[in-house]
């Protein structure tokens, strides 16, 4: 069982764990659907939004870092070697200085943003919150620091712009996660465990077994950034280019000009351990609403 003093939901529910990870993130239908939320949920949505706390930002200095994975013919897939063919070759990439959110965008922040920008709160979010409140008696204040989820790429993009920020590029996300020396995981080379990340969980209702955005400090990156592996996978700005790495520019790459999927990074509460690697790449349709996908924002540092 995953343990964390700040993870109210994890301590309330005693569910069995089952590993699951997909390169293309997919919100498959639940076996048992949650009850449609009545209008009474609106009071709780507003209350959760009132508890919102914005994330501080962390500055990442300009410089080189190792992006991607080396491959040698005949290598077995391991944590150190590539899990799929889109990660190679490993290259030294230069990024200008930037800032990135220390925490994933919280559910409270997201619920605060949607009505302020005349956007509807999705039925998935409404139904989930009603289920958590009416069945599991989780208080509004405990839900506010959950990561935002069931977020489309467009909503994530719009949220960041509204805050005077933007979604990070794939390269910016990877540098924030692995530092300058190509760490296998944000915390280093040790295999994932319940002390450093939320992963490998599953429930029949598709109820996310997530942790508060400011929890699991032992799993933070060398820059002090939380939950870059597990908890909730994260949208970034780039289109997913399977053959992009060999041809990407060595300075400030921004991804292909078009594509079918947007890049999703970091693995989620449902992922296998290998999906938590800092080099692992995933993708999803931009309109996807998944209990596995949230986001964080970034910002360029002006010279």
Image (tube, rainbow, N blue to C red):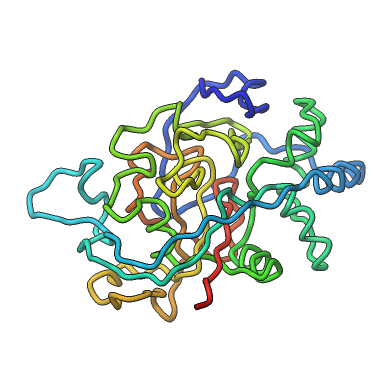
At 30% from the left and 65% from the top, the residue drawn is: 64
| Residue 93 locus on image (x, y percent) | 29, 68
Say which of 252 and 138 sits in front. 252
Say which of 85 and 93 sits in front. 93
Please, is residue 194 above or below residue 249 in the view?
above
Q: Which residue lies furthest to the bottom in this view?
A: 257
Say which of 34 and 248 sits in front. 248
Q: Is residue 140 left or right of residue 152?
A: right
| Residue 138 locus on image (x, y percent) | 77, 29
Tally the numbered discs.
0
| Residue 53 locus on image (x, y percent) | 73, 48
Say which of 125 and 12 sits in front. 12
Please, is residue 124 above or below residue 64 in the view?
above
Please, is residue 265 above or below residue 249 in the view?
above
Please, is residue 244 above or below residue 56 in the view?
below
| Residue 161 locus on image (x, y percent) | 66, 71
At 38% from the left and 58% from the top, the residue drawn is: 175
At 31% from the left and 56% from the top, the residue drawn is: 180
Q: Is residue 135 left or right of residue 10?
A: right
Q: Residue furthest front?
A: 303
Quarter of the figure with residue 137: top right
At 60% from the left and 37% from the top, the residue drawn is: 208
């Amino acid at each position: 069982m995953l343990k964390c003093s700040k993870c109210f939901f994890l301590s309330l529910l005693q569910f069995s764990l089952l590993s699951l990870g997909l390169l293309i993130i997919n919100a498959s239908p639940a076996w048992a659907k949650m009850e449609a939320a009545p209008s009474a949920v609106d009071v709780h949505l507003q209350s959760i939004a009132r508890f919102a706390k914005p994330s501080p930002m962390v500055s990442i200095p300009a410089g080189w870092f190792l992006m991607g994975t080396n491959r040698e013919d005949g290598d077995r897939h391991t944590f150190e070697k590539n899990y799929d063919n889109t990660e190679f070759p490993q290259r030294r990439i230069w990024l200008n200085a930037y800032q990135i959110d220390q925490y994933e965008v919280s559910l409270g922040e997201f619920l605060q943003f949607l009505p302020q920008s005349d956007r509807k709160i999705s039925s998935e979010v409404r139904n989930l919150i009603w289920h958590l409140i009416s069945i599991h008696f989780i208080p509004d204040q405990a839900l506010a620091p959950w990561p935002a989820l069931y977020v489309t790429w467009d909503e994530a993009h719009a949220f960041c712009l509204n805050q005077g920020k933007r979604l990070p590029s794939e390269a910016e996300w990877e540098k924030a996660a692995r530092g300058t020396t190509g760490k296998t995981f944000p915390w280093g080379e040790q295999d994932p465990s319940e002390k450093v990340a939320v992963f490998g969980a599953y429930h029949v209702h598709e109820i996310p077994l997530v942790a508060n955005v400011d929890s699991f400090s032992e799993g933070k990156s060398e820059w002090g950034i939380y939950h870059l592996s597990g908890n909730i996978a994260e949208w970034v700005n780039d289109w997913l280019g399977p053959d992009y790495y060999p041809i990407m520019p060595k300075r400030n790459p921004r991804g292909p000009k078009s594509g079918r999927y947007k890049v999703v990074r970091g693995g989620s509460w449902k992922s296998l351990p290998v999906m938590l690697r800092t080099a692992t790449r995933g993708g999803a349709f931009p309109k996807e609403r998944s209990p596995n996908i949230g986001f964080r924002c970034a910002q360029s540092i002006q010279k």
